[in-house]
């Protein structure tokens, strides 16, 4: 069965659902072929290659919803899926806001988003393995203290997505990605540190050189060696881009429609208010060619778009799917997101913070005593209250210079205070994944250590 | 039950000879070992929000994963189609990891010893959907009735029934039927126009649905979730810096999972990238600490009759009286290290390569009275519940996030404090354990462990424990 056949299967499932008594139905089919190669200490460690597909169906009978999924796309498997969803619609409750998007909200954006590249499908396995080997080798050669490694890897995926509903939408697109990463281990005086770096692109040609990936990963691991725990104090905290992204991840949870209508977000009810320093402009944009957060329509068949979420510190928009939009008396922002199972949730497109004008070096130069964070661990962010407390690793800043490595400390504050005390935003915005941020400096946070 | 009556033989017509042939295909290029993992997974879930049953989902996935090991190399392929051509193709793709003539004689498969840690006649997934919806609705009603300050309640109920069949070129043939169910309740409470606070509770295991009627009712989880949200309404800022920390019994055992469990998984240790590498026989915790990982406790969420490589699970002592005793092995690591498998090879699904993983990880009870432990602390933090944790196994640094904790002042629990992350270093943190309670408790059955992108259900447990020094990441 080829990808071209999948839209027919989706439409057949919808027709069966309508014939079976559903008032409305929508069907998602996705397929994926994955390849991954990992090497360690120069030798191939694992090779994995396979493909799979699955279909999901949501039906509405009146205002009751039922959903089902299957990995069996044969006519028998689809029939079973349809029956299952219809049966379940009888055990759910009437929900006045349950509905599909209106017909005039459906559609797909014009133009080619360039999400698919033939070169990923045709790559010989040797070339892929070689990329992983080169990344790891460059990391191992970088410094004599890099004596071990968790390896180098190459991953690629060729995916396809079909979506159809009973209000006339049918759409399909394919996408590819590939990535190369390295995870070296540095050792000094019996203590070990590891770090990683990666490159990721829609096409093989778009990947950065594997050697540079290996060298950056190695330099990151080396600079962590000899880390100490500092005394508990309040200081300016600088988030490098890779960790600044996680702050955006927290903000996404705080502006997505479900946490808003449930009042489970510290930003619920704050639309139109100034909630952050005026240097903060936060955008969600699912329409930028090549990028990892782009797609022509969302997972309810609504075109993706550019939505300013925070503009100059003012909360301008939540991110919504059809359901949460109706709950809030608003319009969907084209942010419906779902896998194969369940109902549509909410996802982001390319979610990014607009760059400022200072280089990260200039930002560091302006700090007399502070903490430059390069990794965060744990899940200590409470979106309901905004309380923020996470484990951190990084470098201490002394008189404008990165002075020594620090670990086994936490950083804490509240999201509200952090947003309002943003002191600097770097010029170093890069789209390395679907969430992207430049360097961010927060005026003051509690660093807990000794 | 014999193989011929087993799920895959009966439903998909898979014969012992087919398995032997696929294994032979997998080893046709000279691999040393191969295995097949057949999985049929039926799942259901129910979501209640604002007292409306907003979602009800069920579905089925089926597939087979084929793995070939050649030296330290692994080849892996899978298929979501169980036709002989597709399985053969997957076996041939996985076989490519090796290059050479076949060297393993044809396998003859023998069924392993049978036991049943979860003798469930009717799995929750096989009951009427409406019964399960009613359980979830009871939780919703009970949480709302608990206190007028509870203004949002979400209940999710989810179950699955996994049928697995494992055949290996070592001759192992095992199959298992693995039921699992879980209920979770989330609440939000608010005082007037104050800041909302959240509470969460839940539990489950490999039981029949009647467990939720008789052992842990929806009302039990609902009240606990409501209570936790209300407690937080009065919370003060958490302290910042090194403190005496007392962990309450049960779920705070997540400390063991992060601080020592992951670091003892054999894959990290054979590569020498764990902070615990090469430390067997060394003192890594106070002599009061004995930590085990036990996959054989009846009905528990983390328990399995056989692991996902067909080996029987067992009780593994990780730390005995503070001394590091052993690692958690899967087939690959045990082959390379010349060690015995420990029944710790697990995977998320047929699409995934097995790895050494934990099952139910807990600390054995000590002798102290829990009340004496709290009384012994002049000033510190008592942590009753956590929201999860994470570890960097190479440096050994781990965190876990307290979701319900209290200040200890002059030997008494006083005010509740806001969420805070606790941080420590694996091989060091447990050296500061100075008292261990006699009140070992396992968690309620909600744990999910993530490693290299694969999630598996696990359990944890701990008695009340005093740790003399740990960094608390508050703001006060």
Image (cartoon, rainbow, N blue to C red):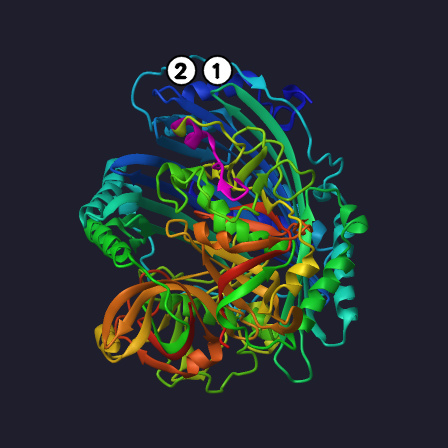
Instruction: Give the class, few, some or many, for how many residues have Cα within 10 Å of label 2's Cα (few <14, many ≥20).
Output: some
Left or right, B97 with respect to B183, comes to left
Decide: marks 2, 1 in contact (CB < 8 A)? yes
The boundaries of the magenta stretch are B319-336
Chain to which mark 2 belongs: B
Which image quadrant for residue B136? Answer: bottom right
Task: Return the mark for residue B107.
Answer: 1
Location of residue A168 with respect to B59 vertically, above or below? below
Q: Which mark is residue B104?
A: 2
Which quarter of the image is occupied by the N terminus of chain A?
A: top left
Q: Which quadrant is the C terminus of chain A positioned in? A: bottom left
Q: Quadrant of residue B93?
A: top left
Report the side of B160 relative to A106 (left or right): right
Q: Name the residue rendered at 54%, 50% in the picture.
A: B256
Mark 1 residue element: loop
Q: Is residue A85 in view?
A: no
Q: Position of residue A239 (x, y in %)?
A: 34, 70
The answer to whether one can see residue B192 in this image is: yes
Q: Using the rendered view, name the quadrant where residue B252 is placed.
A: bottom right
Horizontal and vertical percent for residue B43?
A: 63, 45
């Amino acid at each position: 069965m080829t990808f071209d056949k999948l839209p027919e299967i989706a439409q057949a499932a919808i027709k069966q659902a309508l014939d079976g008594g559903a008032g409305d139905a929508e069907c998602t089919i996705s397929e994926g072929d994955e390849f991954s190669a990992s090497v360690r200490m120069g030798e191939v460690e694992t090779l994995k290659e396979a493909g799979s597909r699955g279909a999901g169906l949501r039906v509405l009978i009146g205002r009751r919803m039922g959903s089902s999924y299957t990995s069996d796309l044969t006519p028998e498997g689809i029939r079973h899926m349809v029956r299952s969803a219809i049966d379940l619609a009888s055990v759910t409750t009437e929900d006045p806001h349950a509905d599909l998007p209106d017909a005039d909200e459906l559609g797909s954006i014009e133009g080619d988003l360039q999400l698919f590249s033939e070169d990923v499908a045709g790559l010989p396995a040797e070339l892929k393995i070689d990329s992983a080997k080169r990344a790891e080798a460059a990391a191992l050669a970088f410094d004599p203290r890099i004596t071990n490694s968790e390896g180098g890897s190459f991953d690629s995926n060729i995916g396809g997505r079909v979506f159809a509903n009973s209000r006339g939408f049918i759409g399909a697109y394919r996408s590819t990605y590939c990535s190369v990463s390295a995870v070296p281990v540095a050792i000094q005086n019996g203590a070990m540190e590891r770090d990683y770096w990666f490159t990721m692109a829609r096409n093989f040609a778009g990947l950065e050189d594997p050697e540079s990936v290996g060298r950056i990963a190695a330099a990151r691991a080396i600079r962590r060696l000899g880390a100490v725990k500092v005394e508990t104090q309040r200081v300016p905290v600088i988030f490098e881009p890779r960790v600044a992204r996680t702050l955006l991840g927290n903000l996404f949870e705080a502006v997505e429609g479900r946490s808003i209508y449930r009042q489970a977000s510290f930003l619920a009810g704050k639309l139109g208010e100034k909630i952050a320093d005026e240097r903060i402009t936060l955008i969600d944009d699912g329409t930028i060619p090549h990028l990892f957060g782009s797609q022509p329509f969302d997972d309810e068949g609504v075109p993706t778009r550019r939505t300013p979420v925070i503009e100059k510190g003012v909360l301008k928009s939540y991110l919504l799917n059809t359901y949460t939009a109706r709950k809030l008396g608003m319009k969907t922002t084209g942010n419906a997101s779902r896998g194969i199972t369940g109902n549509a949730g909410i996802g982001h497109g390319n979610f990014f913070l607009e760059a400022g004008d200072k280089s990260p070096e200039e930002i560091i130069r302006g700090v007399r005593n502070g903490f430059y964070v390069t990794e965060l661990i744990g899940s200590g962010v409470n979106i309901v209250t905004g309380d923020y407390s996470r484990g951190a690793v990084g470098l201490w800043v002394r008189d404008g210079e990165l002075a020594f490595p620090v670990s086994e400390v936490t950083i804490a504050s509240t999201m509200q205070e952090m947003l309002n005390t943003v002191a600097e935003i770097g010029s170093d915005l890069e789209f390395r994944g679907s969430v992207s941020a430049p360097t961010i400096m927060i005026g003051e946070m509690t660093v807990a250590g000794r | 039950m014999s193989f011929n009556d087993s799920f895959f033989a009966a439903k998909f017509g898979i014969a012992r000879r087919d398995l032997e042939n696929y294994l032979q295909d997998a080893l046709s290029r000279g691999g040393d070992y191969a295995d097949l993992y057949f999985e049929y997974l039926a799942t259901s879930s129910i979501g209640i929000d604002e007292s409306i049953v907003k979602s009800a989902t069920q579905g089925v996935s089926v597939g087979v994963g084929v793995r070939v090991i050649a030296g330290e190399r692994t080849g892996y392929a899978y298929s979501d189609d169980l036709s002989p051509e597709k399985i053969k193709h997957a076996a041939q793709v996985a076989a490519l990891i090796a290059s050479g003539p076949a060297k393993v004689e044809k396998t003859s498969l023998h069924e392993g010893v049978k036991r049943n840690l979860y003798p469930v006649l009717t799995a929750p997934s096989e009951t009427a959907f409406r019964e399960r919806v009613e359980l979830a609705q009871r939780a919703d009603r009970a949480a709302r009735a608990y206190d007028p300050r509870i203004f949002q309640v979400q209940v999710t109920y989810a179950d699955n029934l996994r049928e697995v069949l494992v055949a290996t070129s070592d001759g192992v043939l095992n199959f298992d039927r693995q039921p699992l169910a879980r209920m979770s309740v989330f609440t939000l409470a608010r005082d007037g126009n104050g800041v909302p606070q959240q509470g969460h509770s839940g539990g489950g295991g490999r039981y029949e649905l009647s467990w939720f009627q008789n052992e842990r009712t929806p009302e039990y989880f609902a009240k606990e979730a409501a209570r936790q949200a209300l407690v937080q309404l009065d919370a003060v800022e958490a302290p910042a810096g090194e403190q005496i920390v007392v962990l309450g019994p049960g779920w705070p055992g997540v400390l063991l999972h992060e601080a020592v469990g992951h670091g003892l998984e054999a894959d990290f240790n054979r590569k020498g990238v764990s902070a615990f590498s090469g430390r067997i026989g060394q003192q890594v915790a106070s002599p009061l600490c004995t930590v085990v990982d036990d996959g054989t406790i009846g009905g528990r969420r983390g328990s399995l009759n056989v692991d996902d490589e067909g080996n029987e699970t067992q009780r593994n002592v990780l730390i005995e009286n503070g001394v590091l005793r052993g690692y958690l092995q899967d087939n690959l690591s045990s082959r390379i290290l010349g060690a015995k498998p420990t029944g710790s090879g697990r995977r998320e699904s047929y699409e995934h390569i097995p790895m050494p993983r934990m099952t139910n990880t807990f600390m054995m009870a000590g002798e102290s009275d829990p009340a004496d432990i709290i009384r012994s602390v002049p000033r510190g933090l008592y942590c009753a519940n956590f929201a999860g944790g994470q570890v960097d196994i190479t440096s050994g640094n781990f965190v876990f996030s307290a979701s319900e904790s209290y200040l200890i002042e002059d030997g008494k629990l006083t005010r509740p404090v806001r969420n805070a992350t606790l941080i420590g270093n694996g091989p060091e943190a447990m050296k500061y354990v100075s008292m261990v309670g006699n009140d070992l408790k396992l968690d309620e059955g909600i744990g999910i462990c993530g490693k290299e992108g694969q999630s598996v259900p696990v359990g944890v447990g701990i008695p009340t424990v005093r740790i003399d020094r740990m960094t608390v990441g508050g703001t006060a």
